[in-house]
Image (tube, rainbow, N blue to C red):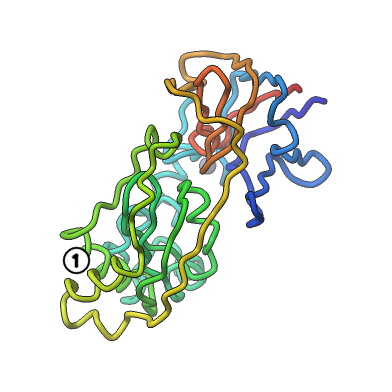
Amino acid sequence: MVFQGSLLKMVSVFNSPVDYYIGTGNDKIHVNSIIGKNLSLIYLNEINCIRCGRKTSKSFHQGYCYPCFMTAPETDDCILKPEMCRAHEGISRDMEWSKENCLQEHYVYLAVSSGLKVGVTRKSQIPTRWIDQGANSAIKIALAPNRYIAGLIEVDLKKYFSDKTNWRIMLSDKMDGTINLVDEKKRALNSVKKEFVPYFTEDTEIHTIQYPVITFPRKLKSFGFDTNNELVGKLSGIKGQYLIFEDGTVFNVRKHNGYKIELRY
Ligand SMILES: [Zn+2]
């Protein structure tokens, strides 16, 4: 089988384990079904902006051409730093987009991806966001009316919780299984500034996520199309947005958004 096209981040369906797909429509590949098989990914030396489609020699912000990177709402500062969002004041690169994306309810959550981390995501992005990060478990802690307020809560909680994921640990079986998310939610509630307490939810449900992985290789080596054109190997699993190969090579699909490839298996 052959798939040829521009890569986009894998689409996930929350099953146990998570189902992953590359491509769309008739060209959709159920990546889980290739686990245990040999596959090759060949870079065809072309990157197309995932927003406007134009060819770009370099990818900015995981898949955008430079003009889109500078002007599109999808690449504005508030995407990486929600506390910088100004849509609630009517300021945005594109207010229509911001109404659908920033001026919507957002969850602040705690997740165990490599270690414990705090994060923010639009309500409708749960559990996709957790799956993309490779979280093994997560708990919602606060519900904010927009991206900005969720960002302020996150900034405050960063004093007590990390907001980073270490991919080497996330893609291993060395993840900390002792973290009690209900206790951590209580700790967050007891630590956060008083003004944010009303946004906290009472819900204590712990969401757990299983990934389709046969074995986690011991030594990991990140593979990128900016230095190599061909990746060949036996797929041993998928976690987050990573393809994991038996020899320890790992490939971040999302990082290669817009890269034109041929996938054979
Ligand atoms: Zn573009």
Q: Is residue 120 left or right of residue 186?
A: right
The image shows residue 235, relative to residue 161, as above or below, that is above
Viewer-closest of 150 and 111: 111
Tell me if the residue at label 1 has its CB under 8 Å from ligand 1.
no
Q: Residue at x 29, y 68 (%)?
A: 183
Q: How far across and down, in percent of the image, does residue 59 sit?
A: 47, 32
User: Could you tell me which residue is drawn at 32 percent across and 62 percent down?
Assistant: 82
- 264 versus 198 height, above or below: above
Front in this rendered view, residue 147 or 251? 251
Q: Element at badge 1?
A: helix
Q: At x 66% / y 44%, what residue is drawn?
A: 20
In the displayed structure image, the side of residue 244 where residue 189 appears, left or right: left
Residue 210 visible: yes
User: What is the x, y in percent for residue 265?
Assistant: 76, 23
Q: Position of residue 225 (x, y in %)?
A: 52, 20
Identify the residue at horizontal 32%, vertical 54% (top origin): 117
176 relative to 192, above or below: above
Residue 262 or residue 29, whichever sits in front: 29
44 lies left or right of 150 = right
**Quadrant where the N terminus lies?**
top right
Camera-nearest residue between 23 and 220: 220
Instruction: Read off the residue under disc 1.
Output: 156
- Amino acid found under the numbered disc labelled 1: Asp
